[in-house]
């Protein structure tokens, strides 16, 4: 126990310089080489304790932790600044794209809807073509409205 | 679901740092982001990128803004679409169903990860009833494409059950209108003309193990009754020939082989690759060994460090690229799967490198007795007496029950890279995945500790090699062709 205590290296970190998450992430980076314990020290400060678990010395681990703190501060800042954006992108990716819905009473599949639309377009185009070629004859006056046909006529009296 | 618009992207940003993860590489930085885009910048430019000082007219602007590394100039629709494509599998359900037809095997491989039993242990054969029930279970998955992989032990030792399962699965596929792929992993020593014909006629794709030249292969794969290498080579040639002479009645797939890298392989990369090329195999999967199953006990003898594997992998990739430059068709499988993610933003079906990992939600392993496991590795841990990865039984469970079992949920949670302290900050996060089974076996917890995790180091090494090659125009051109070939699979 004494040996372990002797080989433990402590690094004090001010919470004014680094927030606790940054300290945790930075300490995690050393967790492959040492057992890490983070405890609150005086107000506004924490102490990260590293007990080497392998061949890397405590001094080297402490130096690596300090370097990692600076890097982690940048990563944390970039991550924080983009949290909303990342969440938006993922939400957008997970939200199904709006498809043009068929009318509720049509009971047609998207494929059938398209087929129907194509057919309508074809018929309309043929009608226009016929109209242009003057083939639109109407001997029975079917296309005339009731008013056009009968408005001028007098009703027969009984 | 309501989509909240990002306010910051439209207004002047308090801090215009782009969404980016990074790693130091070749004297500069590799940048990646959630959508899977990547870019390289020098150290000097890195400072400008991170502080948002890349403006229109800057030489880096076009490349970095197209990849989403310039805030305020992001194609949000495009980036979201890339994320969606890369994670499409999340909405499908398990597609890979591994049926362990028997634990019996006629080999005694040094690294056996399948925890095989002796040839006489018939009690470890899957019964016909269990096999058919397993097929039924597989087809309850909502995934429109089902792959059933027959494994062992040596699956040809339970031939009757194999043929019945194949026929039944084909019927189920026709009735359910699902796409079905059938695959067999065999050492080929029990293959006969009659068996081969059945497999070809039923469109079962065939895969074997090939560890390199005869002496190396036979050193790893001990077969008391004969020469394991000779058997594998004979039948690879047979299936290659059949593939070359397609018939109108059915498709004949190209046979494939799997390489398992043991310590004995490390000094012989050229010979191994030459062996694959000589047999006309167009893919080689440089597969690392994992300390699971029998390999765990023999690790000191046959294992290696992640650094040793990375060095070997680098040499292999160099040689494969050299062969490609000479016009020889050969691809490295792990690289081609990672490139699919890096260059095409697509998930290639590599379940080991997904987030969350493929355990249960992407694959299910069916043990000979009908027990269901998160994956084949989880099944092996079960065979050693620890059923932590068991998610149910085909006779008692429903798919919903299996997927919501404690083991399945624990694997999903522990392999979520957002929840892994190191992974959430890692530049390779968009392409990587952790393995809860490996963590459990090697480090004693599903989460593990990535800073001392050999699999993590190994993957970082492999990504480092791949990204380094992508920086060189000539190598990149060749590697891009590997992904084009993926499209024709």
Image (cartoon, coloured by chain):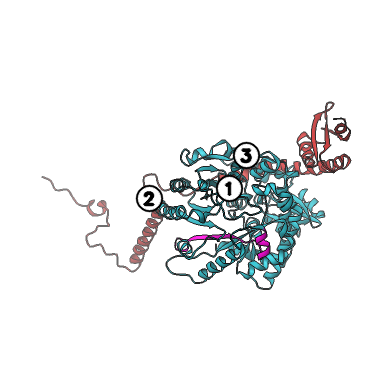
Secondary element type, mark 2: loop
Q: CA distance from mark 2 to mark 3?
A: 41 Å
Q: Which mark is residue B413?
A: 3
Chain B takes which shade in the image? Answer: cyan
Host chain of mark 3: B
Q: Nearer the viewer, residue A76 or B444?
A: B444
Chain A takes which shade in the image? Answer: red
Can residue B20 be spotted in the picture? Answer: no
| Rendering coords of residue B228 (x, y %) | 60, 62
Contact flag, marks 2 and 3 (Cβ < 8 Å) = no
| Rendering coords of residue B481 (x, y %) | 63, 66
Q: Which quadrant, please, contains the N terminus of chain A?
A: top right
Q: Which mark is residue A17?
A: none
Host chain of mark 2: A
Residue at screen point 48% across, 42% down: B394
Contact flag, marks 1 and 2 (Cβ < 8 Å) = no
Q: Nearer the viewer, mark 1 or mark 3?
A: 1
> Going by the image, does A128 lie left or right of B432?
left
* Residue under label 1: B376
Q: Which mark is residue A108?
A: 2
Secondary element type, mark 1: helix
* For residue B119, above or below residue B7: below
Q: Is residue A30 magenta?
A: no
Q: Nearer the viewer, mark 1 or mark 2?
A: 1
| Residue A81, picture quadrant | top right
Residue extending farthest top: A43
Q: Residues within 10 Å of mark 2 (few under 14, many from 20)?
A: few
């Amino acid at each position: 126990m004494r040996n372990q205590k002797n080989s433990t290296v402590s690094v004090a970190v001010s919470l004014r310089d680094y927030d606790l998450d940054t300290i945790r992430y930075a300490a995690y980076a050393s967790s492959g080489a040492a057992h890490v314990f983070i405890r609150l020290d005086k107000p506004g400060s924490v102490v990260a304790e590293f007990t080497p678990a392998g061949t890397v010395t405590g001094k080297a681990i402490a130096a690596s932790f300090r370097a990692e703190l600076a890097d982690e501060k940048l990563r944390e800042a970039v991550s924080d600044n983009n949290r909303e954006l990342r969440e938006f992108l993922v939400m957008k990716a997970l939200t199904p794209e709006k498809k043009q819905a068929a009318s509720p009473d049509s009971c047609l599949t998207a494929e059938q809807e398209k087929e129907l639309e194509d057919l309508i377009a074809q018929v309309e185009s043929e009608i226009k073509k016929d109209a242009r070629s003057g083939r639109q004859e109407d001997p029975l006056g079917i296309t005339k409205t009731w008013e056009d046909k009968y408005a001028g006529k007098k009703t027969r009296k009984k | 679901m309501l989509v909240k618009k990002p306010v910051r992207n439209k207004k002047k940003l308090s801090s215009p740092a782009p969404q980016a993860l990074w790693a130091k590489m070749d004297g500069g930085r590799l940048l990646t982001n959630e959508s899977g885009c990547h870019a390289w910048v020098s150290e000097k430019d890195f400072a400008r990128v991170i502080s948002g000082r890349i403006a229109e007219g800057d030489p880096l602007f076009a490349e970095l803004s197209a990849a989403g590394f310039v805030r305020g100039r992001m194609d949000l629709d495009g980036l979201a679409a890339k994320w969606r494509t890369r994670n499409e599998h999340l909405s499908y359900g398990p597609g890979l169903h591994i049926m362990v037809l028997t634990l019996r095997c006629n080999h005694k491989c040094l690294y056996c990860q399948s925890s095989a039993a002796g040839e006489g242990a018939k009690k470890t054969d899957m019964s016909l009833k269990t096999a058919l029930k397993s097929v039924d279970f597989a087809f309850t998955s909502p995934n429109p494409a089902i792959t059933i992989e027959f494994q062992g032990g040596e699956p040809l030792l339970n031939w009757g059950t194999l043929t019945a399962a194949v026929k039944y699965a084909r019927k189920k596929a026709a009735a359910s209108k699902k796409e079905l792929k059938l695959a067999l992993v065999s050492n080929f020593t029990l293959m006969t003309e009659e068996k081969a014909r059945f497999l070809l006629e039923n469109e079962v794709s065939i895969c074997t193990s090939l560890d390199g030249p005869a002496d190396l292969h036979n050193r790893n794969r001990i077969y008391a009754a004969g020469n394991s290498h000779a058997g594998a080579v004979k039948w690879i040639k047979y299936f290659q020939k059949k593939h070359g002479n397609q018939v109108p009645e059915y498709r004949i797939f190209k046979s494939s082989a799997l390489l398992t890298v043991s310590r004995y392989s490390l000094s012989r990369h050229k010979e191994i690759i030459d062996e694959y090329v000589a047999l006309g195999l167009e893919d080689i999967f440089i597969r690392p060994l994992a300390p699971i199953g029998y390999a765990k006990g023999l690790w000191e003898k046959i294992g290696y460090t992640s650094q040793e594997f990375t060095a070997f992998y680098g040499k292999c990739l160099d040689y494969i690229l050299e062969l490609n430059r000479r016009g020889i068709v050969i691809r490295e499988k792990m690289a081609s799967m990672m490139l699919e993610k890096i260059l095409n933003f697509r998930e290639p079906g590599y379940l080991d490198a997904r987030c969350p990992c493929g355990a249960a939600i992407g694959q299910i392993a069916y043990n000979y007795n009908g027990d269901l496991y998160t994956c084949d590795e989880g099944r092996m841990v079960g065979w050693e007496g620890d059923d932590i990865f068991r998610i149910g039984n085909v006779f008692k469970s429903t798919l919903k029950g299996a997927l919501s079992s404690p083991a399945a949920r624990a694997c999903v949670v522990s392999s979520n890279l957002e929840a892994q302290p190191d992974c959430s900050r890692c530049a390779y996060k968009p392409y990587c995945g952790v393995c809860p089974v490996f963590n459990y076996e090697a480090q004693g917890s599903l989460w593990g500790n990535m800073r001392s995790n050999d699999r993590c180091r190994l993957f970082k090494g492999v990504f480092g090699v791949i990204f380094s090659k992508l920086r060189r125009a000539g190598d990149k051109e060749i590697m891009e062709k590997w992904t084009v070939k993926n499209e024709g699979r």
